[in-house]
Image: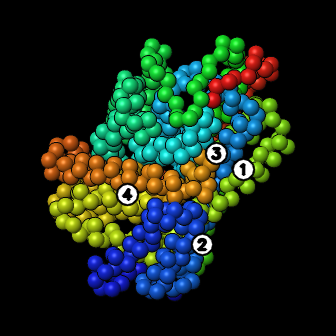
Amino acid sequence: MVWKQVTDPFNNITLSVLVAAIPILFIFWALIIRRMKGYQASLIATGLALLLAIGLYGMPAGLALLSVAHGALYGLFPICWLVIMAVFLFNITVASGQFEIIKHVMASITADRRLQALLIAFSFGSFLEGTAGFGAPVAITAAMLVGLGFNPLYASGICLIANTAPVAFGSIGIPITVASQVSGIPELPISQMVGRTLPILSALLPFYLVSIIAGLRKAREITPALLVSGLSFALLQFASSNFLGPALPDVIAGLGSILSLMVFLRFWKPRTIWRFDNEPAPTPTTAVHYSGGQIIRAWSPFIVLTVLIIAWGLQPIKEVLNATGQVQFEFPGLHNAIQSESGALLPKLFKLNYLSAAGTAILLAALLALPLVGLPYRQGLTIFGATLSQLKFPILTVAAVLGFAYILNDSGITLTLARVLASTGVLFPFFAPVLGWLGVFITGSDTSANALFSKLQYATAESIGVDPVVTVGANVSGGVVGKMISPQSIAVAAAAGNLVGHESQLFRFTVKHSFFMLLFICFITLAQAYLISWIIPTYELTDVKNTPAPPNPSNGYPYLVGLAVLLAGLVSVILRTAKPAAPVSASTEN
């Protein structure tokens, strides 16, 4: 039995849109006004979406339930798999006592919370987004900031907001790759279009983040550092996205801004060290000294993590891991059981890439980190059990959120909302980023939002005489500012920042910033379409029917051998240089 999607169940698009918006409006009401816990809001919203899909859109109940199950399964893997492993790795570092050394090192660079946020949330988070994506940057950076002594709400909130600028180029450029495949526009012009929009936001983001944390006056106090951080990131993001393509902007810009700010801070210091209210001032003590080996040992989990995340992002390694460690199957009862309005059957596959998933790279980093930080594997097992207990509600939340996203998409509810935005005529370039924002809010992924709406963006722009690369790029750029309020992202950040049960606080913290940045990108896109059209890159369309050459897994074996040799050497060096002797005295810094 095949069921055909409908996008206007009332034959009145205005009424259909008002009804389709109910589950999304409920999420906003539940988290902002009612202040529900994340898992409660997600489960009720999923129930509402099921009722609409079955009762008003005519979706068979069996298909609707299978759709929710498909989404929930995707929420468990790879999303929850990644979050669990990221928090597990961090918990290992804390349990071993090595995070105290990391705190000391960070304070030696700067004890100023404003600058620590830039280094970790903005720059390091961007690097992680470029290599791993899918929740890893927020999970790792939020946990690190909380461990350093940040207020959990601010730690999680600013990590979500900082994770906007790099999302478009995340996971080695996958969001733009998908937008290219769906729209037929080559990757490079989409990368160039996005790279002529987001660097503006990137340059302003450090000042914006610090203003949120400390206020405008305190942000102005460190203007030189903000300029170094933001401009170095923006210039590198612009150059790499325009001349190299979508794969490396986050990695290059993230590392470049870290190095630029660290070098700058060797020659410049803020006049006052800013801390949170009621937080004790740092108490430096010359009695504390850690050797280079001890510092390397403390950072070793994140050094190993960085190496593995980069390796897992390399296409030859992905191919060999998928060839030996991937199970893909058609989702029973759902595959090809739904027909789009265009008549195409929707494939519903589930891919269990248990080796190439980013969460597996983090697990391997954790297993290697245990002996490096001096913990036995038996204790590691205990820490893992405690991590699962810590994350039981976030796991439920993420599974419910992805079930919610899948039923909205499969039933046609998402397409109803998209249809009204696409009917705005010459104003469509202004609303094009809203479509991307909506897609990421629902699915939690810029990649998924581009898969959903890139073709619609292309067709609508062509119909009104606007270059389609503007609106396809806007879908990507608008989506990045929806990431910070996606229920999936909120659940991940709450789990990492010890805010389980307080997701509503986090949502209320980020939602106004999401709307403000969305409006900013809407005006930029409108200007690109009509006022500064000279900024649009020239390109030729690709044939979307062309099938890429089949992967050759054997190409990845030399990479894996090289990775093994590199890791063996790295572990050997760390174990040889690390000294077990304790420092002269315990650090008194927070």
Q: What residue does disc 2 label?
A: 69
**What type is the residue that disc 1 sits on?**
Thr
Residue 483 visible in the shown view:
no
**Separation (CA) of disc 2 from disc 1:** 25 Å
Q: Which mark is residue 86?
A: 3
Q: Earlier in the sequence, mark 2 or mark 1?
A: 2
In screen coordinates, is 535 left or right of 66?
Answer: left
Give the number of the mark in front: 3 or 1: 1
Distance of mark 3 from mark 1, alpha carbons?
10 Å
Q: Residue at x 49, y 28 (%)?
A: 274
Where is residue 302? Give x, y as percent.
63, 34
| Discs 3, 4 touching: Cβ within 8 Å | no
Few, some or many C-alpha atoms within 10 Å of disc 4 (few <14, some 14-19, many ≥20)?
many
The residue sitting at the front extreme is 278
User: Where is mark 1, residue-wise?
Assistant: 387
- The three-letter amino acid code for the residue at tag 4 is Trp
Residue that carries the numbered disc 4 in the rendered image: 437
3 or 1: tag closer to the N-terminus: 3
Residue situated in front as seen by the camera: 526 or 355: 526
